[in-house]
Image (cartoon, rainbow, N blue to C red):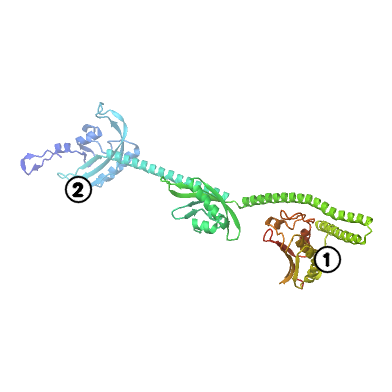
Amino acid sequence: MDSRHQNPSHPSQRFDAATAFESLPDAYLILNRRFEIVLANARYLELMGQSLSDLLGKSIFDVNQFGPAEQREARRAWLGSALRELSVGEAKWSPLFRYEMPGFRRGDGGKDGESNGDVPRYWKIKASLLGAHQGQGGQIALRVSEVTEGMSNYERDQRERAKLRSQAQLRLLLADEAKAQLREHQERFHLALAFSQLGAWELDPATGVIECTDQCKSNLGLDATSVLTEQRLLEEIVHPDDRDRVRDAMHQGLASHEHFDVDYRVGWASGAIRWILVRGVGRFSSDNTLSSVIGFTLDITARKEVELEQREIAASEKRAREHSERLAMAMDHFVTTVSHELRSPLSAILSWTDLLQRAADPSHITRATDVIRRNARQLSHMVDDLLDSGAIVTGKLSVNLQPVDLGALAGIIAEDMRMHAEAKGLQLIADDLTSATVLADESRMKQVVWNLVSNAVKFCPQGSVTLSVRAEGERVELSVRDTGLGLDGESLERIFERFQQFSPEGSGRVAGLGLGLWLVKNLVDLHGGTIVAESPGLGQGATFRVRLPVYR
């Protein structure tokens, strides 16, 4: 190591190897073949905080015994292996070694060598075998490099990276938790919607497309794959009678920037009619442009049916009250009418009876008997009507059905009524009386025809009364048409009610109990037939049509 090398460019100048060794920027140790320290440069002594006298002659395995036993054993194992296997010109690098070495304060006002506690320091060692000199085995050079700062930077970077990874993982974890919570809230929301049968929807005004949940489509009677648009909703799905009402409700709500709600009917593919309640509100952009319409649907069929049923019950109760009031009024009128109708013929009978007792003139006797007979017959008809009405109300009136020629029966009634009609100045026409057999009680059918013809004569001040019988397929129609006072719409609806009498204002009072047409209606029903009243209006006459099954 103390040899000198001459510089070829300066033959007279000698090379000082010891000075060069001391000046090396890296820390070096020189070992002999017994692995004893024979030299250490200044940089090594500075790194280790030791003096050369502390090291010379000592085995490399005995110096720098810092740190835990496992660290010292790892260092000893590598040195033993590397130093014994070195070849000339070969260099071996050690793995990274960690020493728990005493720390020293420098440059902070403290003294060199003053311990600052054990601190971790990191080293790498390069072992090289120097060439043999003067026949002796080569020495070993150990280059000792401290990489603590690099390791500190590396560990700091690793910590930072770990921190960043932890933060990223934390953010990812928080994001996953937030997504999980969102999914849970969405599932709960959809579950709540499904449980309550609420369907959510959103309308895009630009395209008219309605995005809606499966429950919404189910409410409207659509399958999950159906495409829904505003046009399809309003022109196909909503019931035709409700479409204008739905459009108006939506337009008014959007125009006023308020929510709207309206119920309507939809027809399902199964044919069922369902009631749907829709509520919605418009969403507007900053320039007041409608950006979307959102809302929900709810199937309210059960509630609506109850509501309609209650409404119908209320209307029925109202009609029943009105009917009861009409019946009460009609009964009062009936009592008054009966009193008057009975009093008139009775008074006539009594008056002519008194006259018979006082007068011996035969002409007076004949006239008196005619009047008594006519009024007695009128009283008999009234009593019969009253008795028949009581039998009908109690369900005791029966009919004996036999084949009857309705045309012939009508002809007989026409002849019986002709004199009475002509006496009033009316023309009784009975030219169209087709022979047609029906299954009927002859006496009751005569009562029906008699009441209809006499009623027509009664309410026809002038003109004509036409009686006809025609066979029409499986039915036989008997009609009585007059050119008399006629009926208005309200009268047509109530013409067959008991105790009802109708006469236009100014026409005067018409005699009768108000039972005739009611009796006719019930007698026709007992024969399995129907009767209808028709009139173009007041002053334009009326027509009554009786239809009975033809007898085969």
Q: Closer to the N terminus: mark 2 or mark 1?
A: 2
Q: Is residue 258 above or below residue 493?
A: above
Which image quadrant is residue 370 in? bottom right
Which image quadrant is residue 445 in? bottom right
Q: Mark 2 = which residue? A: 89
The kind of residue tagged 1 is: Ser
Give the side of residue 301 with respect to residue 159, left or right: right
Image quadrant in which the N terminus is located: top left
Front one among 122 and 176: 176
Using the numbered discs, state the Cα–Cα distance from disc 2 to disc 1 in whole angstroms.
Answer: 151 Å
Q: Is residue 186 visible?
A: no
What residue is rendered at 74% in x and 70% in y?
A: 469
Q: Which mark is residue 397?
A: none
What residue is rendered at 83% in x and 51% in y?
A: 339
Q: Which mark is residue 443?
A: 1
Counting every numbered tag in the picture gives 2
Q: Is residue 358 visible?
A: yes
**x and y percentages locating residue 94 in the rendered image:** 27, 44
State if disc 1 and disc 2 touch (CB < 8 Å). Answer: no
